[in-house]
Amino acid sequence: MGDTGKPNGEPGLTPESSPRTRWRKRGQAGATESSAEQDGCAALADLYRTHYRSLIRLAALLTGDTSTAEAVVVDSFVALDRTRRGLRTPGDALPYLRRQVVARSRPAARHRPAGGDQSRVVARMPGYPDPAQTPPFERSVVVRALAALPPAQREAVVLTHYLNLTDEQAGAAMRVSQAAVRRHLAAAKKALQAVLTLEGDPAEPPGTR
């Protein structure tokens, strides 16, 4: 699910979604400051167009609130813009964004208002039913089930199941090892089975493989 795909290895962008332009490496000779800045802005804009929706989905599922998710993703792009000259390669940009979204979603989820949010950003994404027939995002079975998980388990499930990342990529976003990701997924599977059974949903829980 999502538009990130599963490239071989981490960090990096998938070949079909790599930015058309590259920002200058530190110390690279040649381009002037103005042309380097233009290239950087173009690359950032291309990342935004290509990955904004999948990052919104990531943040929304981690925080349980789509308005909060939008703020998290925008702040993450601002952070990338401020630090992009320090990235070693353009391929480091997307993993950096994922790490930012995961890290910024943690405090946002802890401080989310109990009443939730009625925004339909995620519901309007391709593959979702008519928004008029979609229940509020924060009241969906999946969101309630994910909210019942500890943060690390929730992150592991969302990154690997909903964004289709490899264990290696998910670990990079969470700043943990692949083995830790697998442990979190195994624990989440047991917890989600219990939660979804209580919700009356017999389907296999997300995050199972």
Image: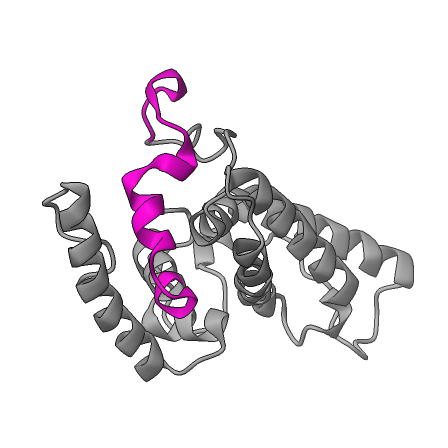
Q: Is residue 18 left or right of 84 when viewed as pictured? A: left
Residue 182 lies, with reference to residue 71, above or below; the image says below
Q: Is residue 162 magenta?
A: no
Residue at the outermost front position? 114
43 lies left or right of 97: right
Q: Main secondary structure of the magenta part?
A: helix
- Image quadrant where residue 177 sits: bottom left
In-front residue for pair 38/100: 100
Say which of 24 and 47 sits in front: 47
The residue nearer to you, when weighing 100 against 65, is 65
Image point 49% across, 77% down: which residue?
175
Query: Magenta includes 139?
Result: yes
Tell me the residue at 55%/46% (across/down). 69
The image quarter in which residue 127 lies: top left
Q: In the rendered view, does 146 fall on the left or right side of 110? A: left
Q: Position of residue 202 (x, y in %)?
A: 9, 45
Image point (37%, 57%), residue name = 158
Read off the magenta span.
Answer: 128-154
Q: Residue 128: x and y, percent? A: 34, 30
In the image: residue 92, left or right of residue 132 = right
Q: Residue furthest top?
A: 132
Residue 11 appears in the picture as rendered: no
Percent of width and height locating residue 152: 40, 69
Query: Residue 63 at x, y = what percent?
Result: 49, 51
